[in-house]
Amino acid sequence: MNSSILSIKNISKSFAKIDEDSITHAISNINIDLKENEFVSIVGPSGCGKSTILRLIAGLIFPTMGEIFFENKKIQGPNRDIGMVFQKPTLFPWLTVKKNISFGLDINNEYEENKINEMIKMIGLNDFANDYPGQLSGGMAQRVAIARAIINNPKVLLLDEPLGALDYFTRMNMQDEILEIWKEKKQLIIMVTHDIEEAIYMSTKVYVMEKNPGRIKEEVKIDLPYDRDRTSLEFVEYKNRILNLVKF
Amino acid sequence: MDNKFTKSELKKLEKKSKSKKEMFFDLLISFLPLLSYAISILEYLFIKDKYENDYKYRYVIFLTVIIVLYLFFLIKNLYIYLTCGDDEKYIKTKNKSLWLFVIFLFLTLFDYLTLKTGILMYPFIPWVNDIINISIEDYKNLTISTLYSLRLLLIGYIVGVVTGLVTGVLCGYSKRVRYWINPILKVLGPIPTATWIPLIMIISSSLFLGAVFIISLGVWFSVSVATMIGIMNVDKSYYDVAKTLGANDKDLIFKVAIHSAMPNILQGMTQGMSSACISLMVAEMLGVKAGLGWYITWSQSWASYNKMFAAIIIICLVFNVVSKILDSIKKYLLRWQNSGGDIE
């Protein structure tokens, strides 16, 4: 009856404030159904609870109300099939690049030398495999973080502004790299971003959110073939439409 | 870049070249200890002794061994510098020269004040040759005492580190454990462990075990506290990342928390070592009938002050070696910390 891999049903999440006796309603009444091989972006003003949605799906926090189902099972905690890349690379500084990438395999006793080397090659860091993260640039570190998440072969990949801290050119490169990965592995990707152009360039569907409390304002399907041309008329039209939605 | 070169070649390329004058000055400084060595020898051999001095030439040999060792390394590293251009080792050796220069001068002065004039009264303060003589004469007792001390120190230290790690990790990770252990640490922590010695000496069935307990208590305390703080301060985002990669509680402790807390843990271990050394000496001086601490009080009671000095010098050497070893362990375990290359 339900072909979706991930369904978010009526969730709300509120946080207690630390210093005063009040509550912040981060998100309220979110309903999303997602299938495999979709690339979904969530855009919206800061503070609208974009990242909260990802953390809920990852099982790092739990909804105040509502339920999230992954493959028709309720999410009870973190799950290897749901990978996440955070805004900061958060590499383990005490492990080499190679050991960082293989972390997920190591702790689950699935160490596979070939798989790891392939991954390092794919992100183009052969020369840095045995270096420690302190020696990497921001772009390289984020590439390692992405490799570390996808080596587990997750069915859902959550990206929390993964390219936010990178410069413009590195970002464009990385957008294409992520798209390559997605085309090959066909997993469901959910990406939070503040860059509307990035969302349109990469996704099949864009959710526009508004805040206080965070909720979905509109779902925009992007019907453009890949590889998309950022300067094409249709692209610009999508951009204008979403920009108008974000204005409030 | 296509052409690859080694680290030393890179350094050579990036270094400012020294002028001839500077190089000559460096060379002059590096041979300075020879001068004070000569002064030492001349002072020792040509000023008349006030006291009887057996095996007079042992001191000369002692000084000569030092200067020969120094010159050997200096010339070897100078040779490396002149042939390969890598001056790292040469500069390291050269940097020791001024200290060595001063040490020889100090030894000269000390010899003059003791053996030559008796301004510093014998037998309370012996001259160096006398200490050398007594060390050679009593080497058996000194060796055994050193080994005893080392055994006690190591056993106590290892017991303390292991128990400290266990309590520290549990306290840092689990609120329930912290509820029970933290107050104990807070109340007992500030008491210097040596305070317990008289009590332990009475209660415990074996003095050796009592001493092990005292030493490990201090180590346990510093390691527990440091580890606990380290683990409590682990960046929570590391846990988030590890969890999304499939880590369970065990992985979070052993693969994330302990590594992240390693700088703190090692700092606690260093602190623990100095407290262990203090406890060791006090325990040996007060109760245990073996070891260098015991040797010191024992020779004092026989008024053999030269033996006391010999033991103190050995303690100084042993503790220095121990902390050097600890330092290199620390450097190895924390090699990921300064991975940004050499910053000078």
Image (cartoon, coloured by chain):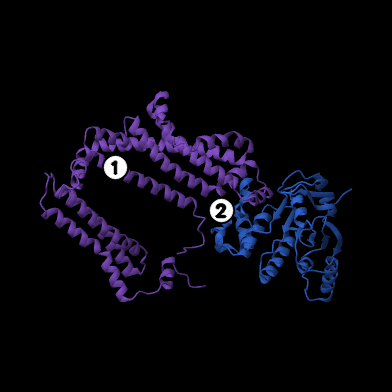
Chain colours: A blue, B purple
Q: Are marks 2 and 1 on the same chain?
A: no
Q: Nearer the viewer, residue A108 or A63?
A: A63
Q: CA distance from mark 2 to mark 1?
A: 43 Å
Residue A128 is left or right of residue A215, and the answer is left
Query: How many tags in the picture?
Result: 2
User: Which disc number belongs to residue A95?
Assistant: 2
In the image, residue B10 sits, relative to residue B182, either above or below, namely below
Determine the image quadrant of residue A229: bottom right
Disc 2 chain ID: A
Q: Quadrant of the C terminus of chain B?
A: bottom left
Q: Residue B101's spot in the image, x, y percent? A: 25, 59
Q: Residues within 10 Å of mark 2 (few under 14, many from 20)?
A: some
Q: Residue B220's spot in the image, x, y percent? A: 48, 37
Disc 1 chain ID: B
Q: Amino acid at mark 2?
A: Leu
In the image, residue B334 sits, relative to residue B226, either above or below, namely below
Residue placed furthest toward the right: A1
Q: Amino acid at mark 1?
A: Ile
User: Which disc number belongs to residue B312?
Assistant: 1
| Residue drawn at point x = 59 percent, y = 65 percent | A137
Q: Regarding mark 2 in the picture, which secondary structure is present there?
A: loop
Say whether marks 2 and 1 touch (CB < 8 Å).
no
Q: Regarding mark 1 in the picture, which secondary structure is present there?
A: helix
Q: Residue A168's spot in the image, x, y percent? A: 68, 71
Q: Residue B87's spot in the image, x, y percent? A: 35, 66
| Residue drawn at point x = 80 percent, y = 46 percent | A64
Q: Nearer the viewer, residue B280 or A100?
A: B280
Disc number lying in front (2 or 1): 1
